[in-house]
Image: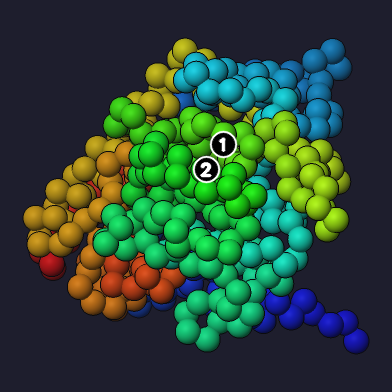
Amino acid sequence: MVRINENYSKIRSSYLFTEIAHRVAARQAAAPDAKIIRLGIGDVTEPLAPAVIKAMHRAVDDLSSRETFHGYGPEQGYAFLREAAAKADFADRGVDVSADEIFISDGAKCDCGNIQELFSSDVKIAVGDPVYPVYVDTNVMAGRTGKNDSGRYEGLVYLECTAANSFVPGPEAAEGADVVYLCYPNNPTGAVATKEQLQKWVDWAREEKSLILFDAAYEAFIRTPGIPHSIYECDGARECAIEFRSFSKTAGFTGVRCGYTVVPKGLCAYAADGTRVEMRPLWTRRQTTKFNGASYITQRGAEAVYGEEGRAETRKTIDFYLENASIIKKAVSSCGYNVTGGVDSPYLWVDVKGPSWDFFDRLLDEANIVTTPGAGFGRSGEGYIRISAFNSRENVLEAVDRLGKIL
Ligand code: MLT
């Protein structure tokens, strides 16, 4: 008799976006002619940049002859991509991260989910509430929590992200936590953190010998000067922070799959006897054992994002999504709703003045618009919905027109 990992039984429901997909499929079945507009999951709609396409075509050609063929790639990713990322994402911004601290992967979601394997099973985890569900669910699966009876798991530290703190909690709420997940620009609220706010977290982590797992998947949407793009812009962050980056939203790679994780040299956690242990060799060991790298074609495509053409083209696409966000923000605000986010972020966080799943269902049934109910991101997300700005302009304009009619 094979016993299951009982921790899976603690997980309350299906993955949020799977539940939404079921409701959308039910709506479509009930109204087969309805044109459903999807502003739910943050999935990109615009094609890849021409520079990326060209680079991927060239990479395919490389694989067609023995001289330029590539089999297994280097463990951490190809040097051409790690070096391009180290230069453009860090050195050019005056931030100290070297190419050999960058680990290329098939996306930030996997890395955010896998990183917890490096920590002991009894570390205390802190997460925002509302939160991107991957941080929570992967720790539940790993047995770091108790049951979830009241919308929250026993054993986790929840950092309230509410209108009262402008959706940016400070470290005073994280007492007793060993590892804290932070995400800015935030998914789901769209809030951004200032350098002072992030510096407080870094100072706290160094003081407490804690670690910050910083998800910067949406950094490319930052347009406001002075807002940090990386946790390593803060003094001392190299000693206490791991950062995740993604090409999904930056360059439309949600289907292509590529991201990377920065584990600085010298970043340590502790063995049971109190000795300091470097995390970088541990992550190397984990990745080389369980992962064989993003494909050569993908990495060549990602490299092109950093070229002159690729940079200009991807920036234009992000500007396009930001303009979508601004159109939606204006329309929803003018219907009398408080909207956070949508600036420096593709997500809008709307106070719907009532239960979020009811509002979600209303928009789906009455306007054929898919959003994401805030309650799906945690108890403090109740009363909100998240609207994603990833869609065509035509659909966004039609969506705001429909919203204007029913709200
Ligand atoms: C979201 O909608 O929250 C994201 O698309 C999910 C993800 O990036 O995995």
For the point 44% across and 33% down, the residue is 229
Image quarter of the C terminus: bottom left
Q: Is residue 248 left or right of residue 319?
A: right
Circle 1: residue type: Ala
- For mark 1, give the secondary structure: helix
Marker disc for residue 17: none
Q: Which residue is mark 1?
A: 237
For the point 83% across and 58% down, the residue is 272
Q: Nearer the viewer, residue 2 or 47?
A: 2
Query: Mark 2 to mark 1: distance in Å?
Result: 6 Å
In the rendered image, residue 93, in percent from the top left (x then y), is placed at: 47, 20
Q: Looking at the image, is 110 positioned above or below residue 26? A: above
Q: Nearer the viewer, residue 279 or 384?
A: 279
Whether residue 176 is visible, yes or no, is yes
Q: Which residue is mark 2?
A: 202
- For mark 2, give the secondary structure: helix
Q: Nearer the viewer, residue 81 or 161?
A: 161
Q: Is mark 1 within 8 Å of ligand 1?
A: no
For the point 22% across and 69% down, the residue is 352
In the rendered image, residue 369, in percent from the top left (x then y), is placed at: 29, 63
Image quarter of the N terminus: bottom right
Discs 2, 1 touching: Cβ within 8 Å: yes
In the rendered image, residue 208, in percent from the top left (x then y), is placed at: 60, 52
Q: Is residue 329 left or right of residue 262?
A: left
In the rendered image, residue 292, in percent from the top left (x then y), is placed at: 80, 40
